[in-house]
Amino acid sequence: MYTFYQTEAFAAWLRNIENARARAGVLARIRSAELGDLGDCDPVGEGVSEIRLHIDPGYRLYLWQHGPRVFWLLAGGDVRSRQHDIDRAKALRREIEELHHDSTQHI
């Protein structure tokens, strides 16, 4: 079993999915991933991977594995905004990594 954390950007994106059926599909996909089934998932660079969902406009979830069983859900989007979403996810990953690195420096 994996632990998934969400960035505020991801949580806001998820809240803004207007189609309740699509939102339920995204939540079900996250639950499957928590149970170990990442499914249709490929790397997009800089440690970020993309989970493709075959519902509505082609939703995408961008995640980063931070430790053996911990993932960050960085951003979400659909096929129309794919490159922008990938760039945003990579930037968010760098921010989280810097914050984590800075916090361990003070221990």
Image: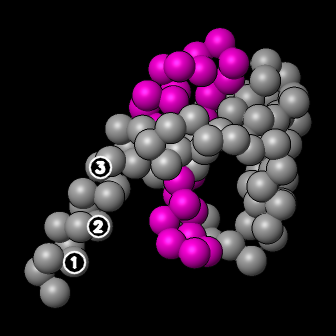
Q: Earlier in the sequence, mark 2 or mark 3?
A: 3
Helix, strand or loop status at disc 1:
helix
Crowding at dot 1, Cα within 10 Å, few <14 / some 14-19 / many 20+, comes out as few
* Quarter of the image where the C terminus is located: bottom left
> In the image, what residue occupies the spot 69% across and 41% down?
42
- In the image, residue 60 sits, relative to residue 46, either above or below, namely above
For label 1, the residue is 104
Looking at this view, is 22 or 94 the one in front? 94
- Quarter of the image where one finds residue 32: bottom right
Mark sitting on residue 95: 3
Rounded to the nearest angstrom, the CA distance separating label 2 from label 3 is: 9 Å
> In the image, what residue occupies the spot 79% across and 67% down?
36
Residue type highlighted by circle 3 = Glu
Res 13 visible: no
Crowding at dot 2, Cα within 10 Å, few <14 / some 14-19 / many 20+, comes out as few
Residue type highlighted by circle 1 = Thr
Helix, strand or loop status at disc 2:
helix
